[in-house]
Image (tube, rainbow, N blue to C red):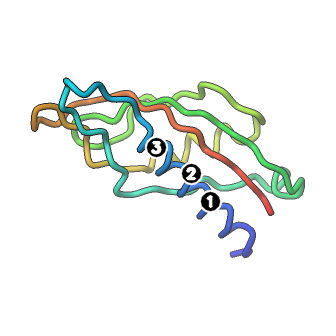
Amino acid sequence: MHPASLQTRYALIFAVFLALWALPLRADEKAEPPVPVRTVAPEVPSEFARTNSTGLVTVNFMVDDKGNVQEPKIVKSSNPSLEEPALVAIKKWRFKPATKGGTAVAVHVTIPIKFQVE
């Protein structure tokens, strides 16, 4: 694997963890957000990798009460060629489900996925 590709993947995963910690929760709900337990970095399209640029795809999806990703949708994208790789990767993710009052619940999550080729 190309070293720049590894850097891209690690930067992506780090950015996603930061985004998940920023999920808004009301204090009175006593809810815990979902926590990723398996992440898969998206493949960077070769035509994008040659540009040595950055891209951002924002994805919204539901994490069900079993921790599976359901109904992923693109909310915003800086480059259409990055959308399909982002969706394919997100579908492979697994989470510790969100909980409310100690019970696993389904929640919607919106995360940015940053593609950066150095």
Q: Which residue is mark 2?
A: 15
Q: Position of residue 111 (x, y in %)?
A: 52, 37
Nearer to the camera, 47 or 51: 51
> Looking at numbered disc 1 in the image, what kind of residue is underneath it?
Ala
**Residue position for label 1:** 11
Residue 60 in the figure: left or right of residue 26: right
Residue 82 quadrant: top right
User: Which secondary structure lies at badge 2?
Assistant: helix
What is the secondary structure assignment of the residue under circle 3? loop
Q: Quadrant of the N terminus?
A: bottom right
Q: Residue furthest right?
A: 51
Write the residue at 22% across / 33% down: 31
Residue under numbered circle 3: 91
**Of the residues shown, which amino acid type is indicated by label 2?**
Ala
Cα–Cα span, label 2 and label 1 = 6 Å
26 in relation to 64, above or below: above
Please indicate whether residue 40 sits to the left or right of residue 86 in the image.
left
Label 3 Cα neighbours within 10 Å, binned few <14 / some 14-19 / many ≥20: some
- C-alpha span from label 3 to label 1: 19 Å
Q: Are marks 2 and 3 in contact (CB under 8 Å)?
A: no
Residue 44, image x, y percentages: 71, 54
Residue count near mark 1 (Cα–Cα under 10 Å), binned few <14, some 14–19, many ≥20: some
Q: Residue at x 72, y 75 (%)?
A: 3
